[in-house]
């Protein structure tokens, strides 16, 4: 699988999808005009990656803000991971202690995807 | 571009305008608008938690105008341009912000929004979260006419009820109404 590396912009995050090192990371703000298109290749990559359920994988969400369309895509991402049954997995949700909204987002996803054991990490 | 395609971004502290921008609503202008607004509010040492909430609501509101405003234009690269107005007012006595967006929509869209407003009425925090989660699970719900997850997200950011009004207009088409969404933070 080819890695995906996307630099951040004013309205989209830095995306790192490193197959060899089992690292998936999103960092920055996320509210692109066409959110679903922005994530199209990313979702495809994730689906393919999680067909193999043995690789040690770390996923870091370092999103300081994301719009509602991104919320739906994140839900899709967690859904793919959850359905894969992948066990060697560490998912970290980074939140800003000064911004309660980012912790609230963590609560939504961690409660909905309890089996994924998403960890909250204060920035 | 004519004068009708203006985004009137305006931040007012009491009755004094501290920031104003007139331009078309595009994604680029939304980025400029929200970043300017956030910096202005931070520079005025206002409640940081509220600033984050205002930032979140503003982006949702402006992207909703961009996506759903009647007569918006989409170019070959799927970039949009739309009409609308957007204002944030701060009252230094009550320490409250009022965020307001308005744009033309079709009557069909207004019916969808009215239904959504009714759905939100009287919901407590737990019920609101449940509704949000149901919308997170479906990309399709509400997206044809707006008033989907974005609308519920805006409503969930504040304990105050959101205020929605529709005004009849003879502009452009008899099938349109002027939609105004007001949120207090």
Image (cartoon, rainbow, N blue to C red):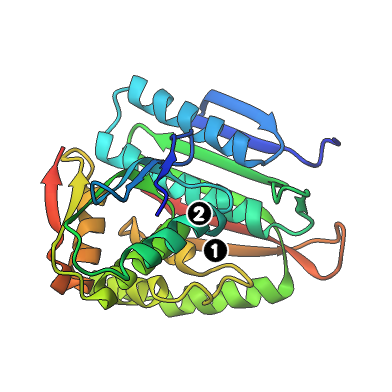
Residue picked out by circle 2: B182
SS under mark 1:
strand
> Where does residue A2 sit, x and y in percent of width and height?
42, 49
Residue picked out by circle 1: B164
> Where does residue B28 sit, x and y in percent of width and height?
61, 35
Q: Is residue A110 above or below residue A29?
A: below
Q: How far apart are marks 2 and 1 (CA)?
A: 6 Å
Whether residues under marks 2 and 1 lie with C-beta atoms below 8 angstroms apart, the answer is yes
> Where does residue B34 sit, x and y in percent of width and height?
49, 35
SS under mark 2:
strand
Residue A68 can be seen in this image: no
The residue closer to the viewer here, A70 or A26, is A26
> Are the residues flagged by discs 2 and 1 from a single subunit?
yes
Chain letter behind tag 2: B
Left or right: B178, with A75 as reference point: right
- Kindly identify which numbered label has been placed on residue B10: none
> Where does residue B177 sit, x and y in percent of width and height?
73, 64
Q: Which residue is drawn at 38% across and 68% down?
A: A76
Q: In which quarter of the image is residue B166?
A: bottom right
Chain letter behind tag 1: B
Q: Residue at x 42, y 24 (%)?
A: B40
Residue B139 can be seen in this image: yes
The earlier-in-sequence mark between 2 and 1 is: 1
The residue closer to the viewer here, B134 or B57, is B134
Left or right: B48, with B135 as reference point: left
Characterize the local packing of mark 1: few (<14), some (14-19) or many (20 or more) Cα atoms within 10 angstroms.
Answer: some
């Amino acid at each position: 699988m080819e890695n995906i590396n996307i630099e951040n912009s004013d309205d989209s995050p830095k995306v790192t999808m490193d197959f060899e090192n089992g690292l998936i990371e999103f960092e920055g703000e996320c509210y692109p005009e066409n959110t679903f298109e922005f994530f199209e290749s990313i979702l495809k990559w994730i689906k393919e990656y999680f067909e193999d359920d043995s690789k040690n994988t770390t996923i870091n969400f370092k999103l300081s803000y994301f719009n509602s369309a991104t919320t739906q895509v994140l839900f899709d991402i967690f859904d793919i991971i959850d359905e894969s049954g992948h066990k060697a997995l560490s998912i970290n949700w980074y939140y800003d202690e000064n911004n309660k909204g980012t912790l609230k987002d963590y609560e939504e996803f961690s409660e909905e995807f309890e089996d994924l054991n998403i960890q909250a990490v204060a920035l | 571009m004519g004068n009708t395609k203006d985004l009137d971004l305006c931040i007012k502290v009491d009755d004094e305008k501290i920031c104003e921008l007139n331009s078309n609503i595009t994604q680029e202008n939304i980025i400029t608008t929200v970043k300017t607004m956030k910096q202005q509010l931070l520079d005025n040492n206002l409640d940081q938690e509220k600033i984050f909430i205002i930032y979140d609501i503003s982006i949702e509101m402006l992207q909703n105008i961009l996506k759903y405003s009647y007569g918006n234009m989409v170019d070959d690269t799927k970039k949009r341009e739309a009409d609308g107005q957007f204002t944030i007012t701060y009252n230094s006595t009550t320490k409250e912000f009022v965020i307001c967006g308005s744009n033309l929509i079709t009557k069909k869209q207004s019916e969808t929004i009215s239904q959504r407003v009714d759905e939100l009425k009287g919901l407590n925090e737990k019920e609101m979260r449940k509704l949000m989660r149901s919308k997170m699970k479906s990309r399709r719900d509400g997206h044809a006419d707006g008033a989907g997850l974005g609308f519920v997200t805006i409503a969930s950011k504040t304990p105050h009820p959101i205020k929605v009004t529709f005004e009849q207009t003879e502009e452009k088409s008899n099938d349109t109404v002027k939609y105004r969404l007001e949120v207090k933070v």
